[in-house]
Image: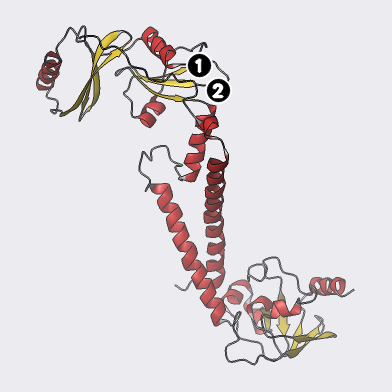
Amino acid sequence: MRIGMINARSLHRILGLIVGAQLIIWTLTGLAFNLIDDRQLDANTMRTKPDSTTLIKPAVALTQIVSEITDQQKNNAIEQMNLKRVELATLLERPIYRLKTSNGTFAFWGDTGEAVNLDNEQLIRLARQSYQGETSLSEPILDKAAAQRYGGSPAFYRIDALDEQGTQIFIDGLSGQVKAHENQGSRFKQLLFMLHFIDYFPDNGLSFNHLATQLIAFAALLLGLSGAWVLMRKLVAGDYVSWGTSNSEGQLTLLSPDGEPLESLILAPGNLLDGLNQDRSRIPSQCGGGGQCGMCRVRFVEQAPQATPEEQARLKQEHLAQGIRLSCQHNCHQGKVALTSRAQLRFWQKATR
């Protein structure tokens, strides 16, 4: 099935809007990153800096905790996990073990050996320790979306600080880690990053080569191919180079729909519509010569040129048989062409006053 010039041009324009819009977004977001002060986009403006804490000697040995985990795996037929890292820290003035494994991060109190599962009071205490200054804090809110964003456990909480920056504190209740702070500036920064990296779908994860990027890349490829197709068709039609034709100027007589002479024009080689409108707008067109609006019709009084696929798609067969063509689809013509409607005649009369 042959793709018509009109369809290729329509596809090219639609793809140009899509890719062009993303290009504008890239430019504007990149400009914003360079012009906006980093401190205004910093998420940690109200976060306390980590300081050295005194480690508290745990009462329960690490081997005992690992042994209990291994026994639970055997009893519950859970796939054995690989231990990658062990950290001894202090949380809320208590010793804590954090075990990073192939199945995730687990935390245990070093004084009791129990798994960490912070309650609301402990969560608020931890949030207050991570906040620099005095402010009111909301009750902890379970936030599954933030857990996915920050790679947290099912017990992942958000605590809102009632300050001017709109600070939000995110805490993993099963590890006791303050995962992140967010505020109005950092959320705007996240929006800029989302637009800049085409991260429009929430389940993209950390991969850059996600579906949205692939769609924009494919649209850019089609934009180039459709543009090449339109260019080749216009080259073959002689819109840019008059193959095998004379470069000398030609005389054309413009007639009314009734065949009465209106004016004689000396046209330079090139597109017929451009030649007719070279010094004033004689023939109307809404698509700029794209062959889509069909307003630039003229009737060739003498030998009409062969109809292009665009004209076959736009004009009726009876009009083609009468010699009616789209002036934007043909080169300058020596001879006579006539307007096709009273509306065109009125447009010409206004243009020549």
Label 1: how many residues lie within 10 Å, few (<14), some (14-19) or many (20+)?
many
Name the element at disc 1: loop
According to the picture, the residue beneath numbered tag 1 turns out to be 161
Give the side of residue 153 with respect to residue 264, left or right: left
Give the side of residue 350 with respect to residue 209, left or right: right
Q: Classify 1 as above or below 102.
A: below
Q: Nearer the viewer, residue 4 or 230?
A: 230
Q: Is residue 117 visible?
A: no
Q: Residue at x 51, y 35 (%)?
A: 189
According to the picture, the residue beneath numbered tag 2 turns out to be 165
Q: Nearer the viewer, residue 47 or 14?
A: 47
CB under 8 Å between callouts 1 and 2?
A: yes
Q: Quadrant of the N terminus?
A: bottom left
Counting from the top left corner in percent of width and height, residue 149 is at 39, 31
The three-letter code of the residue at mark 1 reads Ala
The three-letter code of the residue at mark 2 reads Gln
